[in-house]
Image (spheres, rainbow, N blue to C red):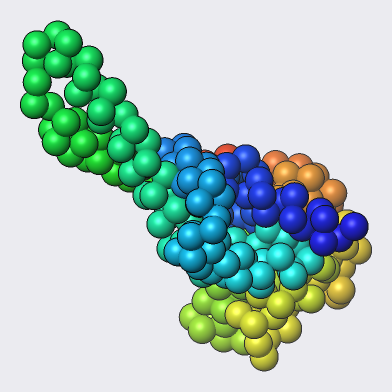
Amino acid sequence: MLLDDALRRHLLMFNYQGDGNGRHHAPLRPLLDLVSGMGFLAGMASLLRNWRDWRSLFVLAALGLSLAPSALAVDAPHAMRAFGATSFAYLIAALGWAEIVRIAVPAVKRSRQEAQRPGVSRGFAVASVVTLVTLAAALNSWTYFSLMPRDPEVFMGFYPVQSHMGAYVRSVADDEGAAAAAQLYVPQWLPEDPVFAFLTHGLKPQTFLDDQLSQPVSAEARFVLSGYFYRDEAQVLMDVLGDAPRPLVVGPIFPDESKPTFVVFPVQ
């Protein structure tokens, strides 16, 4: 059953639904753009039609072997483990579009000859290739440089909150000393996060869970609230921060400009 499901997912990954992990690819979007995906389907049809040719068998086998690491992954399809299939997928897409152009050129040539306008087959082929390559490049540029950077499913996969909060705690220790960092309060779950733990190695900030604090606050204490829940956390900590706390530091904004990655409030 698991192998059947993996096979189904890999048959659909190039043209329908790809990897859901935003660290690998645009979540759940096809791994090939529309132009390359159409060529891939045509290329696969051509290879399967000529499966007795050793060259077709070689390309199909190479594609299958390069997809094996992804097929054996628990969270298949796995775009990073299937990275080796990229060159073969685009080779098949190129073969598919070459087949389409090969079929289309004679038809265009005949139609233009009937209209007494001969001599366009070479120009048609060149124009087709340039158009397809340009369109594929534009679609991939839009996906990787416009769509993905602002997608929460993508940037949240890189732990922006934990990273920026850890960098802030480290900067306080570097600029003001470890004693100052020990007066920073962070959510109780945060020190267990491996990203935050790596960035704050050797430091021991205080923690809070709802309104329960790891130790009583001092006048120098600061609360570092995560961008995920800072409004709710500030409301719960009203007795410490006041009913209208003013941020001391606002962390970098998420790429979609929805909220800051963290907010620091002083004790009132």
Q: Quadrant of residue 265?
A: bottom right
Residue drawn at x 13%, y 33% as measured from the top left: 123
Q: Residue at x 33, y 44 (%)?
A: 98
Residue 209 percent location from the top left of the image: 87, 62
Displayed quadrant of residue 122: top left
State which quarter of the image contains the N terminus.
bottom right
The foreground one among 60 and 110 is: 110
Q: Residue at x 83, y 68 (%)?
A: 188
x%, y% of residue 146? 42, 42
Q: Position of residue 165 (x, y in %)?
A: 62, 66
Q: Is residue 140 left or right of residue 211?
A: left
At a point 68% along the width and 58% down the height, the residue shown is 77
Q: Nearer the viewer, residue 248 or 92?
A: 92
Q: How many numbered callouts?
A: 0
Q: Is residue 84 visible?
A: yes
Query: Percent position (x, y) of residue 101?
Result: 31, 36
* Residue nearer the viewer, 203 or 69: 69
Query: Vertically, is 114 above or below 167?
Result: above
Would you say residue 138 is visible in this rendering? no
**Farthest residue toward the bottom?**
202
Instruction: Identify the image quadrant of the C terminus.
Output: bottom right
- Left or right: 179 with respect to 37? right
Farthest top residue in view: 115
Residue extending farthest to the front is 52
Left or right of residue 197: residue 253? left
